[in-house]
Image: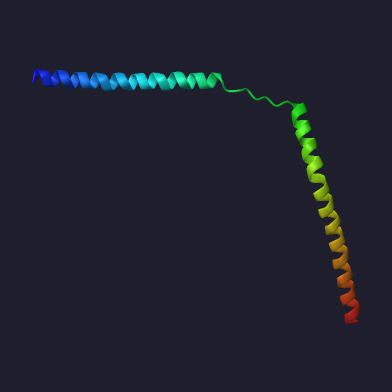
Amino acid sequence: MHLLFDSLILSNYLQTNTFMKLRLLITVLWIISLACRPVITVGWWEMAIVGLLVALLAAPPLLRLYRRLVEFKRWRKNQKGDREIENE
C-alpha cells in the first residue's frame, strides 16, 4: 500500500513538474515574442500620403462615373421630352 501511495505521489509530482516546465517555456517564449514585435506608428504625414494616393487612384474612375451619370440624366431628360412631343 505504501509503495502504491509513493508511486501516485511521484506520478502526480512528475505531471505537475512537467506542466510547470511547459507553462514556464510557453511564458518565456511569449515574452520573447512580445519583445520582438515591431512598433508601428502612423503620423499625420503618412496619413496624408496615403490619402493622396487614394485620391489619385480613385479620382479618374469617379470622374468618368460622374460624367456618364450627367450624360445619362441628359439623355433621360431628352427621352421624356420626346415622349411628350409624341403624345401631343
Which residue appears at 15% of the width and 18% of the height?
6
In the orientation shown, which residue stands out farthest toward the left?
1
**What is the quadrant of the N terminus in the image?**
top left
**What is the quadrant of the C terminus in the image?**
bottom right
The front one of 49 and 3 is: 3
Q: Position of residue 86 (x, y in %)?
A: 89, 80
Tell me which corner region of the image, top left, top right, bottom left or bottom right, holds residue 38: top right
| 48 lies left or right of 10 | right
Q: Position of residue 23 (x, y in %)?
A: 38, 21
| 48 lies left or right of 87 | left
In the depicted structure, whether residue 12 falls above or below residue 56: above
In the depicted structure, whether residue 76 falls above or below residue 13: below
For the image, the number of numbered tags is 0
The front one of 4 and 52 is: 4
Which residue appears at 57% of the width and 23% of the height?
37
In the depicted structure, whether residue 87 falls above or below residue 22: below
